[in-house]
């Protein structure tokens, strides 16, 4: 039995005379411990997914932009621009949801740092996709 559970069980017995405060005290003492520094929580998992989506969109958007300028390949890069827009938007939305629902600050396991990184990377992917599409509309 952990010390936290032992305290949660012993406190109501010691504070039995206070009546209504006893369940509240037991509830406060029985809160789950903070996640470990390297534990993969749900917030961290979703933040990682959002960052990977945004990063994939940024890479594809950069390649599509290079293709639209004629530096690599023969295509126009329109399909890559659309993929970059969709992946960037998905990373941006998921990152925003992670930031909005995070319970605490950095290091609490809510994934807030990853959510902010996903917002930035998703925005970069959106900008690259938009630049490629505007270049495609001008040239062809």
Image: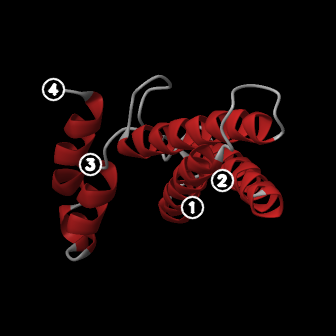
The C terminus: image quadrant: bottom right
Answer with mark 1 or mark 4, whichever residue precedes in sequence. 4
Which one is nearer the viewer's eye here, 129 or 100?
Answer: 129
Q: Is residue 41 above or below residue 97?
A: above
Position of residue 54 measured from the top left corner of the image (x, y, whole percent): 59, 43
Answer with mark 1 or mark 2, whichever residue precedes in sequence. 1
Q: How far apart are labels 4 and 3 at the CA level?
A: 12 Å
Q: What residue do we see at 82% from left, 27% from top?
A: 71
Q: How far apart are labels 1 and 2 at the CA level?
A: 7 Å
Circle on res. 1: 4
For label 2, the crowd category at 10 Å Cα-Cα, with few meaning under 14, some 14 to 19 and many 20 or more, is many
- Does the residue at mark 1 contact the one at mark 2 (Cβ under 8 Å)? yes
Circle on res. 96: 1
- Does the residue at mark 3 contact the one at mark 2 (Cβ under 8 Å)? no
Q: How far apart are labels 1 and 4 at the CA level?
A: 39 Å
Residue located beneath label 3 in the image: 30
Q: Is residue 103 visible?
A: no
- Does the residue at mark 1 contact the one at mark 4 (Cβ under 8 Å)? no
Image depth: mark 2 or mark 4 in front:
2
Image depth: mark 1 or mark 4 in front:
1
Circle on res. 119: 2
């Amino acid at each position: 039995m952990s010390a936290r559970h032992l305290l949660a069980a012993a406190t109501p017995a010691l504070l039995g005379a206070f009546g209504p405060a006893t369940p509240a005290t037991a509830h406060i003492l029985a809160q789950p411990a903070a996640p470990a520094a390297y534990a993969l929580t749900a917030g961290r998992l979703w933040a990682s997914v959002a960052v990977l989506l945004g990063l994939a969109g940024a890479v594809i958007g950069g390649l599509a932009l290079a293709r639209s300028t004629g530096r690599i390949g023969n295509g126009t890069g329109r399909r890559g621009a659309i993929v970059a827009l969709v992946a960037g938007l998905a990373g941006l939305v998921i990152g925003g949801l992670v930031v909005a629902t995070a319970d605490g600050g950095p290091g609490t396991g809510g994934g807030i740092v990853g959510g902010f990184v996903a917002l930035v990377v998703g925005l970069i992917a959106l900008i690259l996709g938009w630049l490629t599409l505007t270049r495609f509309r001008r040239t062809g």
